[in-house]
């Protein structure tokens, strides 16, 4: 394992005396309120605001079942991850656990694939944010806004982990308040309590009055699953961040226990409101976006501008967390010797500066590709990282099957959070994720994502196996001491 550059004495924070370091040398600067909001905000991506309209158009009211199925899958995965993270808090999270439980090749492969996923996400979110900002201030070109956003959030991450946590606390707070208010006001309108709503007071009629609950047939539930599954990516960020918190075990335990109500309120609750306020086939749901259409139905003035502010906040939150997540995964890979040693060094503020800057450089490259070759090079990057979320969840499942035994053997008292009905629900979750991957092969867009993601995954696994083989050969050739 690589040593770290730390400038503090034992048990002290670099630059902040009296506060404990995290076990791997990073700054333990995240407070419990930061972790709580990172956990809540982690499941609310820009995809929920922007992409839900297409899912509703494809499946009708049955999209609620699609969200419920994917939500259940995420609850199970987070429970498994929580079991391991509470017992072994680590900035490498599932990659470090896979390294221990499945082998060096698994930790290396899933770590780099996850890093690759978030680097591409940086480009997607920077461009999305730049489009909104350009519409407000057209005098500044879109590429300049993307640059400004990336530079500001890079600086935030470089200052300290506490500044990342503070930014994320407020970004996530705005998202949470916005969706909470949307659900409350929407339900008041649905049941006719809110005066002045233009297209409200219909109760639950819209769930069945336009072709029934399954207007596109029960099979549309699976189509909906493919469309919503990727909007849940990010729920696992809290387990990476926990390694830099004051009380990682308590933070992760609380986050994994609350994931059920978070998904129920933010996803199922908000989509339920949209479907009860408007017929599922209302053209405005796709044209304006599901939330804007619902706000217009309630009679909220300037709904489009209001939603632009909320979407921009979600985009900035995703960018902020994506940069943090990519850098901490690079840091963990550096620690284990699977990335350049410089990635594992921290500066006097306890920040892995090289890991952050390297991730940003590749993020800028991806942004450049997005503007220069959006339909070729960037489309390839986007599709080749598209199924990584599902690969990560699969690895978490297989890792937990092995890690349970390791934890029980080495430190059974740390098994505070337990996966329900182990190992049956773990295997059921593996079956669910595998089914989604196979079903994606029947979908034109999904097929390209799965095949390209498998190609990239095979390449990364191949590199890891070659490295392992060379390492074993070198060890065998080395003279015994």
Image (cartoon, rainbow, N blue to C red):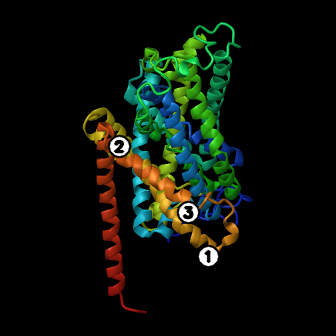
Reading the chain from its start, which is encountered first: label 1 or label 2? 1
Query: Disc 2 vs disc 3: which is toward the camera?
Result: 3
Q: State how far apart marks 2 and 3 are (Cα).
A: 26 Å
Residue 440 is marked as: 2
Q: State how far apart marks 1 and 3 are (Cα).
A: 17 Å
Answer yes or no: is residue 320 visible: no
Residue on which disc 3 sits:
423
Residue 40's quadrant in the figure?
Answer: top right
Answer yes or no: is residue 291 visible: yes
Reading the chain from its start, which is encountered first: label 1 or label 3? 1
On the picture, is 268 further left or further right than 113?
Answer: right
Say which quadrant the C terminus sits in. bottom left
Disc 1 to disc 3: CB gap under 8 Å: no
Q: Secondary structure at mark 2?
A: helix
Residue 25's quadrant in the figure?
Answer: bottom right
Horizontal and vertical percent position of residue 348: 59, 57
Residue sitting at 45 percent across and 40 percent down? 230
Disc 1 to disc 2: CB gap under 8 Å: no
Query: Disc 1 vs disc 3: which is toward the camera?
Result: 3
Q: Secondary structure at mark 1?
A: helix
Horizontal and vertical percent position of residue 100: 50, 69
Residue on which disc 1 sits:
409
Horizontal and vertical percent position of residue 284: 46, 15
Q: Secondary structure at mark 3?
A: loop
Residue sitting at 55 percent across and 28 percent down? 271
Residue sitting at 66 percent across and 73 percent down? 411
């Amino acid at each position: 394992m690589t040593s770290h550059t730390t400038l503090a004495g034992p048990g002290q924070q670099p630059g902040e005396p009296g506060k404990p370091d995290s076990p791997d040398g990073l700054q333990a600067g995240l407070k419990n309120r930061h972790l709580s909001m990172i956990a809540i905000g982690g499941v609310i991506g820009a995809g929920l605001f922007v992409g839900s309209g297409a899912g509703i158009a494809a499946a009708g009211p049955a999209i609620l079942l699609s969200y419920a199925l994917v939500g259940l899958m995420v609850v199970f995965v987070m429970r498994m991850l929580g079991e391991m993270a509470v017992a072994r808090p680590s900035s490498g999270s599932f990659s470090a656990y896979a390294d221990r439980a499945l082998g060096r090749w698994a930790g290396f492969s899933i770590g780099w694939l996850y890093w690759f996923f978030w680097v591409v996400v940086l480009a997607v979110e920077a461009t999305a944010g730049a489009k909104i900002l350009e519409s407000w201030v057209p005098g500044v070109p879109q590429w300049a806004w993307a640059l400004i956003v990336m530079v500001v959030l890079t600086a935030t991450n470089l200052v300290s982990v506490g500044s990342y946590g503070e930014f994320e606390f407020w970004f996530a707070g705005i998202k949470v308040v916005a969706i909470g208010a949307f659900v409350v006001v929407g339900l008041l309108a649905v049941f006719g309590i809110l005066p002045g709503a233009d297209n409200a007071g219909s109760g639950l009629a819209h769930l069945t009055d336009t072709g029934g609950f399954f207007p596109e047939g029960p099979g549309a539930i699976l189509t909906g699953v493919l469309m919503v599954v990727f909007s849940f990516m990010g729920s696992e960020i809290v387990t990476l961040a926990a390694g830099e918190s004051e009380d990682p075990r308590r933070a992760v335990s609380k986050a994994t226990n609350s994931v059920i109500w978070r998904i129920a309120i933010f996803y199922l609750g908000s989509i339920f409101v949209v479907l009860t306020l408007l017929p599922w086939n209302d053209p405005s749901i796709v044209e304006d976006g599901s939330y804007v259409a619902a706000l217009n139905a309630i009679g909220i003035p300037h709904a489009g501008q209001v939603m632009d502010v909320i979407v921009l906040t979600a985009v900035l939150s995703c960018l902020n967390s994506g940069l943090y997540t990519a850098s901490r995964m690079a840091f963990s890979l550096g620690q284990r010797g699977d990335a350049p040693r410089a990635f594992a060094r921290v500066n006097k503020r306890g920040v892995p500066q090289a890991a952050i800057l390297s991730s940003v450089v590749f993020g800028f490259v991806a942004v450049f590709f997005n503007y220069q070759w959006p339909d070729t090079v960037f489309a390839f990057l986007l599709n080749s990282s598209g199924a990584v979320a599902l690969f990560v969840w699969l690895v978490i499942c297989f890792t937990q099957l092995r890690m349970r035994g390791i934890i029980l053997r080495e430190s059974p008292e740390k098994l505070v959070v337990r996966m329900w009905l182990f190992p049956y629900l773990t295997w059921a979750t593996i079956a669910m994720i595998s089914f989604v991957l196979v079903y994606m092969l029947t979908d034109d867009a999904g097929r390209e994502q799965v095949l390209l993601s498998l190609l990239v995954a095979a390449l990364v696994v191949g590199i890891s196996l070659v490295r392992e083989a060379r390492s074993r050969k070198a060890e065998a050739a080395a003279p015994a001491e």
